[in-house]
Amino acid sequence: MNEQTIKKILRVVLYVFSFLVLWEWIWPLETISDIANSHYFVIFLVFMLAADFFSVKWLWKWSAALIYIVVVSYILYYESNPMFGSGGLTLLIGDFINSIIAVIRFEWNDVTNSFRTFLFFLLLWMMTYLLQYWLIVRKRILLFIVLSIAFIATLDTFTQYDGDWAIVRLFMLGVTLLGVLRLLLLIEKENVIVPIKVYYNWLIPLGLLAIIAMTVGLMAPKPAAQWPDPVPFLITNSNKFISNEEKTNKVGYSEDDTRLGGDFTPDNTLVFWTMVAEKHYWYVESKDKYTGFGWEVSDSMGDYGEMPYTSGTTFPYMTSINEKLELSDPQFDYIKGIYKEDHIPYPSPSYNGMIIPEGSSDQLILDIETNKLTYAEGNSFRIMGTYEAHYQVPTYHIDDLRAAGADQINQFYPESDFTQLPENLPERVKELAESITKDKTNMYDKVKAIEDYFHSPDYLYSREDIPYPDEDEDFVDQFLFESKRGYCDHFSTSMVVMLRTLDIPARWVKGYTAGEYVRYQSDFEQYIYEVTNNNAHSWVEVYFNGFGWIPFEPTKGYDLNMSIERNTAATPTDDPRTPEEPRAEQPEQEQTAKEEKMKEDATEQLKQDEKSDTKISESLKNYIADHWKSNVIALVVLLVFLWLIYLFRGKWRPRFWIWRFGRSNDQEAFSEAYAALLKELNRCGIKRKSEQTLRDYAQSVDSRFATEEMSELTMHYERIIYGNGEASEIWEKVKPLWKNVMKKTIT
């Protein structure tokens, strides 16, 4: 076995062991996250490292990698659709366009899973490049090994992943890699030919040392843990865990809201998917009794709390009661449920709605107190599968809302109290609400002032490090004045309670946000969304005379997508004041109106921008779907053209260099021209060996072409390198020599 064979074997060992180290990074992901099908990522790592090992041209390597990523994305997310035509590839491109727009707008929830997978592939691609750089160029791998051990140790400490043996494997791999790289680095620095015996004398003790160290480490007695498990320590010393029953919850819909607070962990479980004309919230139920710790149902209706709802009839909660209310044309949503709950979500805000189950004429059950809709077959509830929601979308006008009060609520809800508050509610909650609304003269402006208050920098949206209130502490009071961090339950509950301190009827609503965008269904001109447990949400509804319950959104980062506009023309009835009323406060009201108008214009502009982005992306997707054949042909022609340019580069590139450097006489021209010549000589098969000097290489070129031009050219080049001549003068003198050698590379 000669030296070159041993070097090749060592190079194989470096790449294989490096792959195993990378594998230790991917292996835990299925345990600690929602990543599945990790074998696709392992195959990608093998391919990229193998391509680097065999020095595959970058064009072929990149092309194959991109094709692999596209094929895997199709298998994972679009396999139910045909790959070509208006199927998988079109959907993939459309999702990428929408995801890029979402990233630019920082709307992370709208980034599709296929695009996230693509980004993860890019991360692995970057890691293989860095690994190849550390191995072959720098020959230093210690930092990567240390980071790998730290990564596994962190996962072993703070997650359910057991990394004991992973750390042992990383130790063995790291010692071997460090030893082999050190040997190769010494040989490269000293630039000597090493006898075969030296390799054996180095590698055999290295292997024995690693085995002995691992054996001693495993068998030697070890002291007990000096630091207890930090996770129980952190939990038991956190003020959010005040009883054995309280723990970190998974996000999602739950019927029990009697004790709010605590952390929530994400849950991507699919609840339902829907096809809609415009995205909106999904209403499930409302609750009216605040206890100081959470929400309950007051049971004001007694035994009459439930009533049958016949499929296809107007839903009571979604009935229009105001002639001034502007409604859209009737539209419908198609919902396919994969429920673990018996509830049936319906659009919010909406009016004149009907729920139509698919393939069933059975009645639905409506809870009058909570507006919760369930599906009944006989006397037992069952999970609902697929249904349609027909409804109209309202457009509210600000002046009409400002003129509306809430005194008529008792006519429709005589037994309910939507201003109920616990007796022990701290007085400072009411004082805060009054201070926020002290300059507001109507109910709508007061509601908006409190809604806007929660969008200030003083409050932070977070699902982590969220405390439970103590037994003698009010949930809202703790959020408003102590923690000032929380999620939707904190923001929405606090707004309802603050409104009730002002005698404004409000209630707490639960349901889902619009979900994650999937694709555009061109056949129906609608959008498909997936709604998961992560989209479970709560918000606020306020009662206005003549309009019923109107939703409001105090939670940071969320948008109801509700249309509120200014009245197009003022009429005498738009002003609730009589002509005899004084107008001393008119300048202040006009200023408030101007500020409100500016906010509305900004909101409207944002909506227009969103619609514009959507139209652009939809136009692109429709164009791709309608012209995919011509697009594929054009792409193939372009790729063939680029391939021909690359294939015949030996014909045109030397001429390009002659044209470029033949006209240049600056100081750097000779150095750049000589480097270009070396590149062309390498392309046409005259490769320079790592141990060759420039003079030796020039002699091999001259022997190939039967000239002495390359040697003379190299001699003048060395004069410039060592500062023994004026570069521009020498370049002008040797330019004919350079052109002659360059022309010989034309093939």
Image: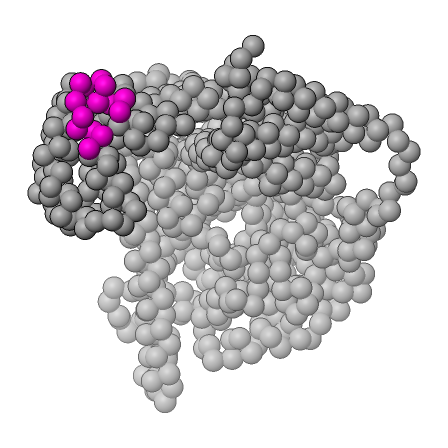
Q: Nearer the viewer, residue 510 or 300?
A: 510
Percent x, y for residue 379?
Answer: 66, 27
| Main SS class of the magenta portion in the image | helix
Quarter the C terminus occupies: top left
Q: Residue at x 48, y 70 (%)?
A: 449
Quarter the N terminus occupies: top right
How many marks the image carries: the answer is 0
Inspect this view and state whether residue 453 appears. yes
Dividing the picture into quadrants, the one containing residue 173 is top right
Dividing the picture into quadrants, the one containing residue 166 is top right
Percent x, y for residue 360?
Answer: 50, 22
Q: Residue at x 13, y 48 (%)?
A: 729
Q: Residue at x 65, y 40 (%)?
A: 146
Magenta stretch holds residue 583: no
Q: Nearer the viewer, residue 376 or 129?
A: 129
Report the coloring of the rendering: one colour
Magenta stretch holds residue 709: yes
Dividing the picture into quadrants, the one containing residue 186 is top right
Q: Which residues are magenta?
A: 699-712
Viewed as shown, does residue 442 lie left or right of 501?
A: left
Inspect this view and state whether residue 354 appears. no
Viewed as shown, does residue 699 lie left or right of 186?
A: left
Percent x, y for residue 511?
Answer: 55, 44
Q: Give the vertical position of 481 relative to 488 (above or below).
A: below
Give the residue at the far top of this rendering: 1
Q: Residue at x 43, y 19 (%)?
A: 54
Q: Give the vertical position of 645 relative to 333 (above or below).
A: above
Percent x, y for residue 663?
Answer: 8, 43
Q: Nearer the viewer, residue 693 or 384?
A: 693
